[in-house]
Image: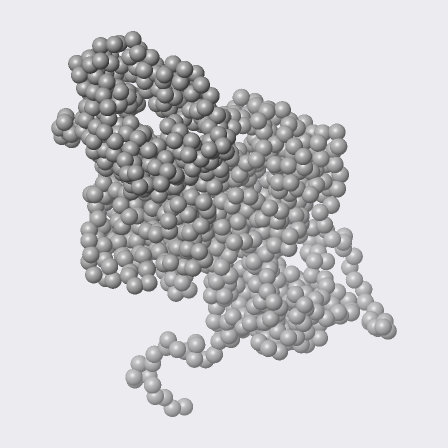
């Protein structure tokens, strides 16, 4: 790829840093803010000087171009430069100060960010700037030359007709770019609104929340609106409500509490800081936000935003896509047997699955009449499941086995050895799987054996507290028999009656069949880097376009299909399924139809099974406002119901709010890839066929 | 009820159950089949009539599949058409999920006509015409080759349709049973199986996908299947390593016995025939012992007789009673070896449609054919049967309605007792037109005067 022009790179860094001032990732917003600062050339030029010095210094000491630290120090240095420009006009002396403090900011950023990240996995935010700015204020009181030379009176860009309760907001917004004036505030707010409705909402919401508390405590509304540090409320709101957390009712409530907490920090710090003549800067914001994200992260708050995208709206869509489609927290294992078995006791079962053992499953084999035995069932050998192979549900190591106990005759139980004969397997993921009531002398593995999924372990028996032969399975976090069980799921299975695969929970009476893996199907999705696939696209049987896809790899190792416009469709393997993880790109492309027609497929050669998938808003052009969606995550949800009707053919029904939108059909190639995709919309039939 | 008068008689004492003429096995009567009176069948469909039960077929299939699939993860079953290829029977099997196993172009066409996709057909047998190979390859059938000449024929067939097609090979081996079925397929021990694979892998139009064997019929020793699995898996490993390919399927054929009593066996089938589970265990357990989970190929069984034999009966009527010169009692019934090819090797269970009193004696049951060989049952222990008594012969589900022949009589109806208890005629009795339909008389032979 051609190297970008250095000036352009610097300009992009600059606009990026500017938009970072209000925790936004947008070049256009950055440019707007930059233009704002041009109203006060002192601020603009000191900021740019500081930024350039910081970048040069970083390169000089050997920080690489692609180091993520670059963004952090350049943004802090920019703020530092603004702080100097806010106080002093551009003179030799003030530039000397800018150079020195810019370098200091780089050092502070580097050090603090590694300390915070390594100790607490926390971002550095703009703490370096807060410290630098404090240093500037404290030190400049000693420099009489500087004050004589550079102190200046600023122009005010205010509109006096605006009422106080709006002026307060505008000035707080303006101060984000060191220009607490009405006009600048209007520009900043418009920039925020243009960028994201959610960010705009939290801006307004958190500002007035903070002001309300201030006014109550101080007893005066005008005093509250005049409070210069109230911009911290906005920062807290944007950071928590739109950036570090996923926008939701709960998150907004948390933001509300965070603003409340920051009120006291503002006033407490100001007692000290003001006595030295320093503004509190962003200290309240830094302190509050860091405390919140550290604690929320530690208690595993479910709506942390780990992949922060450039807009809260996009973070929300991305979060919902992953939350609704993938559960990577609950351990998921295969069934420990072959063929069709029936759930005899599920979680919170009526007999023994209670208390700390509530997360366990019992399985038996039933015939069509629901009997578990042939003949009269007077002998254990009459039971269908007795002696059937028990196979490993995971890849793991055998840590304990026991098979010396006799199998009970039907209707008798061994009360002294509840668990009977058993096998305990340790998963490399940290948990243990315990399978019990095995047949005497049937265990085929030894302690220390490494077993893969499907390895025969033993045979189903009737040892222990077992009135009829059955299989008990539970997941533990300790290797000892009888310890508490924890929640888990089964994957790669089909419900015999409905044909649905991989339900979240099995209940008593469910008949389950494990899906067997197939090399033939897996091979269809083994795409190789740079492999290309070309499609002809027909709309209503008229050729409309051509699509060319190439297989590419992201820097984090995930693969994606890329069309010629650079839109991306990420794919991979998850729990014996081929999945399209997400789509990233323009709203109306043909590439999305691959994912709409088949977001996932179980890699089995069985046919006639069905499954549902949540379809993300970025796949289907949705006009539903995201600000409303952030309040009600389940509103305006689109679902696809898919059926593998026969070998290589998957049919789908796309449903929104219980009404069908359109039907899809995808045909897989015999060898590799997707052959045909048909989208039957009401007025338009799209047919994509491989060339 | 008043006790019936029985004429006094003298009878030779035999040693009870263990006598060489058979057992009290034939004793007994049945007034119905699955609750339907015997008379209903003959009134509706005439005599003789074959009767099949949908319910028993399904139950038996499910029992076998359930056991097999809970013992091996990639268990597949394919319906052996030659066992019983009536459309209704095959449809039940296909509804249950079985694919079709055919051994001739006729059976192949019959399966396709019924709606079985080509890639769900296993095409076996020692003789496959080249035209049918072309069709099978075109439609993606699983073709198992039998010999080197057929292999070359298959290459020609694939070449003529410009395709590279998957094939399997039929193999045979010594599994310790007699007789060893060595006439079908390539022998493993003398390396011809391996040579066949080598030839296939070097062919431009074929590649190997599976191995098929079928070690015998009415096998009474499950251990033979253990041997077969071990030898086939060893061959599979050798092939996979040498040619760096994955074998997609193994097919262990069929040959599992039913509860029919083989002639020459001493013990009743309830004692001498191991339960079908033991045969499946022999296959599945050995596979699990020999293979690692990521190596598991699809494994097919082509069980025919064991599924359907006991779900079928033949209802026939006594037409005449005759005392032979040596004093043996004999009966002539309306069904003979023309319908009962399997009577050559089975002693059927004979039941009568009513309770009859009188001296039980060993009797011969003859068919209606004007041929000395037409003996349906050589020795049945029966009370004196009046004319018109209906005999119910069983098990009758396997092979008869495929191997029957149209010799001097029409073939009779086949009825099916549906799951809900209703009766359906799944094959009507033949008529003159059915028989003479294909005939053509040359012009000069058309006229004659007598």
Compared across the picture, whether B263 is left or right of A51 comes to right
From the viewer's side, name the closer residue of A434 and A414.
Answer: A434
Tell me where residue B309 appears, x and y as whole percent.
Answer: 57, 58
Residue B336 x, y percent position in the rendering: 56, 69
| Residue B211 seen in render | no
Position above or below: A78 against A460 = above
Q: Residue at x 25, y 34 (%)?
A: A157
Q: Residue at x 28, y 21 (%)?
A: A83
Q: Which residue is most to the right?
A: B2
Q: Position of residue B195 (x, y in %)?
A: 32, 38
Please provide percent x and percent y for residue B240. 36, 35
In this rendering, the answer to whether B415 lies above or below A467 is: below
In the image, is residue A316 above or below residue A108?
Answer: below
Q: Residue at x 27, y 35 (%)?
A: A158
At 77% across and 67% down in the image, what residue appears?
A: B359
Q: Nearer the viewer, residue B416 or A689?
A: A689
Q: How many marks?
A: 0
The part of the image, by quadrant, that contains residue B128 is bottom left
Taking the view exactly as shown, the residue that stands out farthest to the bottom is B449
Q: Nearer the viewer, residue B302 or A667?
A: A667
Report the side of A438 relative to A636 (left or right).
Answer: right
What quarter of the picture does the N terminus of chain A occupy? top left
Residue B344 figure quarter? bottom right
């Amino acid at each position: 790829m051609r190297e970008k022009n250095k000036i352009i790179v610097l300009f992009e860094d600059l606009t990026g840093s500017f938009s970072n001032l209000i925790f936004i990732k947008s070049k256009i917003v950055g440019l707007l803010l930059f233009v704002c600062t041009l109203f006060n050339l002192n601020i603009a030029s000191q900021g740019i000087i500081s930024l350039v010095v910081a970048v040069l210094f970083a390169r000089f000491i050997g920080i690489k171009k692609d180091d993520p630290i670059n963004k952090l120090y350049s943004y802090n240095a920019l703020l530092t430069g603004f702080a100097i420009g806010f106080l002093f006009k551009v003179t030799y002396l003030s530039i000397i100060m800018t150079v020195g403090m810019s370098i200091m900011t780089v050092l502070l950023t580097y050090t603090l960010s590694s300390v915070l990240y390594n100790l607490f996995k926390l971002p550095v935010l703009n703490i370096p700037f807060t410290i630098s700015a404090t240093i500037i204020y404290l030190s400049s009181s000693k420099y009489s030359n500087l004050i004589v030379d550079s102190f200046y009176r600023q122009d005010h860009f205010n509109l006096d007709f605006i009422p106080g309760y709006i002026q307060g907001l505008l000035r707080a917004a303006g101060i984000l770019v060191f220009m607490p004036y009405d006009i600048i505030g209007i520009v900043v707010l418009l920039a925020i609104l243009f960028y994201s409705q959610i960010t705009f909402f939290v801006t307004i919401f958190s500002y007035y929340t903070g002001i309300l508390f201030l006014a109550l405590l101080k007893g005066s509304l005008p005093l509250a609106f005049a409070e210069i540090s109230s911009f911290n409320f906005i920062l807290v709101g944007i950071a928590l409500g739109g950036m570090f957390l996923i926008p939701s009712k709960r998150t907004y409530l948390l933001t509300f509490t965070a603003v409340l907490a920051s009120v006291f920090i503002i006033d407490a710090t100001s007692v000290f800081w003001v006595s030295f003549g320093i503004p509190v800067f962003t200290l309240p914001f830094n302190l509050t936000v860091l405390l919140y994200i550290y604690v929320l992260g530690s208690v595993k708050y479910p709506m942390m935003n780990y992949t922060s995208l450039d807009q809260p709206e996009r973070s929300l869509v991305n979060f919902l896509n992953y939350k609704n489609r993938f559960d990577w927290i609950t351990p998921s294992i295969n069934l420990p047997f072959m063929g069709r078995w029936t759930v005899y006791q599920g979680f919170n079962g009526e007999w023994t699955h209670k208390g700390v053992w509530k997360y366990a499953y019992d399985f038996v084999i039933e015939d069509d009449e629901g009997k578990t035995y042939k003949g009269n069932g007077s002998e254990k050998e009459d039971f269908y499941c007795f002696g059937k192979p028990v196979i490993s549900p995971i890849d793991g190591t055998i840590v304990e086995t026991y098979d010396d106990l006799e199998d009970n005759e039907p209707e008798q139980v061994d009360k002294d050895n509840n668990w009977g004969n058993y096998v305990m397997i340790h998963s490399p993921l940290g948990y243990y799987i315990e399978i019990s009531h095995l047949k005497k002398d049937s265990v085929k593995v030894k302690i220390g054996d490494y077993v893969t999924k499907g390895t025969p372990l033993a045979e189903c028996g009737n040892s222990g507290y077992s009135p009829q032969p059955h299989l008990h399975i539970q997941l533990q976090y300790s290797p000892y028999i009888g310890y508490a069980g924890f929640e888990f799921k089964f994957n790669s299975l089909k419900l015999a009656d409905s044909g649905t695969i991989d339900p979240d929970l099995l209940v008593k009476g469910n008949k389950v069949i494990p899906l067997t893996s197939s090399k033939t199907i897996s091979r269809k999705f083994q795409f190789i880097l740079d492999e290309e696939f070309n499609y002809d696209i027909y709309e209503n049987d008229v050729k409309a376009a051509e699509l060319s896809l190439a297989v590419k790899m992201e820097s984090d190792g995930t693969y994606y299909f890329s069309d010629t416009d650079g839109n991306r469709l990420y794919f991979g393997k998850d729990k014996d399924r081929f999945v399209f993880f997400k789509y990233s790109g323009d709203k109306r492309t043909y590439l999305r139809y691959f994912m709409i027609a088949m977001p996932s497929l179980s890699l089995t050669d069985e046919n006639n099974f069905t499954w549902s998938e949540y379809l993300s808003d970025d796949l289907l052009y949705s006009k539903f406002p995201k600000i409303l969606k952030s309040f009600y995550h389940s509103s305006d949800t689109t679902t696809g119901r898919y059926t593998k009707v026969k070998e290589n053919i998957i049919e789908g029904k796309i449903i929104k709010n219980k009404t069908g939108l359109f039907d899809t059909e995808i045909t897989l190639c015999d060898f590799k890839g997707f052959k045909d995709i048909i989208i039957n919309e009401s007025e338009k039939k799209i047919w994509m066929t491989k060339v | 009820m008043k006790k019936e008068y029985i004429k006094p008689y003298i009878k030779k004492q035999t040693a009870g159950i263990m006598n060489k003429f058979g057992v009290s096995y034939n004793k007994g009567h049945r007034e119905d089949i699955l609750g339907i009176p015997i008379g209903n069948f003959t009134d509706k469909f005439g005599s003789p009539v074959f009767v099949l039960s949908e319910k028993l077929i399904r139950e038996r299939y499910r029992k076998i599949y359930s056991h097999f699939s809970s013992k091996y993860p990639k268990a597949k079953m394919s319906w052996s058409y030659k066992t019983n290829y009536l459309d209704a029977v095959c449809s039940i099997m296909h509804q249950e999920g079985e694919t079709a196993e055919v051994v001739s172009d006729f059976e192949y066409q019959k399966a396709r006509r019924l709606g079985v996709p080509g890639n769900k057909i296993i095409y076996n047998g020692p003789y496959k015409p080249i035209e049918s190979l072309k069709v099978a390859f075109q439609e993606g059938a699983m073709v198992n080759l039998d010999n080197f000449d057929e292999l070359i024929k298959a290459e020609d067939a694939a070449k003529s349709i410009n395709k590279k097609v998957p094939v399997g090979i039929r193999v045979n081996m010594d599994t310790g049973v007699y007789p060893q079925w060595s006439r079908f397929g390539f022998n493993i021990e003398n390396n011809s199986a391996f040579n066949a694979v080598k030839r296939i892998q070097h062919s431009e139009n074929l590649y190997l996908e599976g191995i098929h064997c079928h070690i015998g019929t009415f096998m009474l020793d499950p251990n033979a299947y253990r041997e077969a699995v071990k030898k086939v898996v060893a061959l599979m490993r050798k092939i996979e390593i040498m040619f760096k390919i994955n074998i997609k399927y193994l097919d262990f054929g069929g040959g599992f016995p039913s509860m029919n009593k083989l002639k020459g066996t001493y013990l009743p089938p309830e004692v001498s025939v191991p339960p079908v589970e033991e045969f499946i265990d022999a296959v599945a357990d050995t596979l699990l012992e020999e293979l690692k989970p990521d190596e598991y190929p699809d494994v097919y069984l082509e069980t025919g007789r064991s599924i359907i034999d006991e779900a079928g009966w033949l209802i026939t009527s006594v037409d005449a009673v005759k005392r032979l010169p040596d004093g043996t009692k004999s009966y002539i019934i309306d069904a003979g070896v023309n319908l009962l090819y399997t009577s050559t090797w089975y002693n059927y269970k004979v039941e009568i449609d009513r309770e009859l009193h009188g001296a039980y004696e060993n009797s011969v049951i003859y068919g209606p054919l004007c041929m000395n060989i037409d003996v349906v049952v050589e020795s049945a222990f029966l009370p004196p049967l009046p004319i018109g008594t209906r005999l119910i012969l069983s098990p009758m589900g396997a092979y008869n309605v495929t191997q029957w022949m149209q010799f001097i009589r029409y073939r009779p109806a086949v009825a099916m007792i549906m799951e809900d208890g209703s009766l359906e005629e799944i094959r009507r009795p033949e008529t003159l037109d059915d028989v003479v339909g294909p005939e053509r008389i040359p012009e000069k032979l058309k006229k004659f005067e007598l």
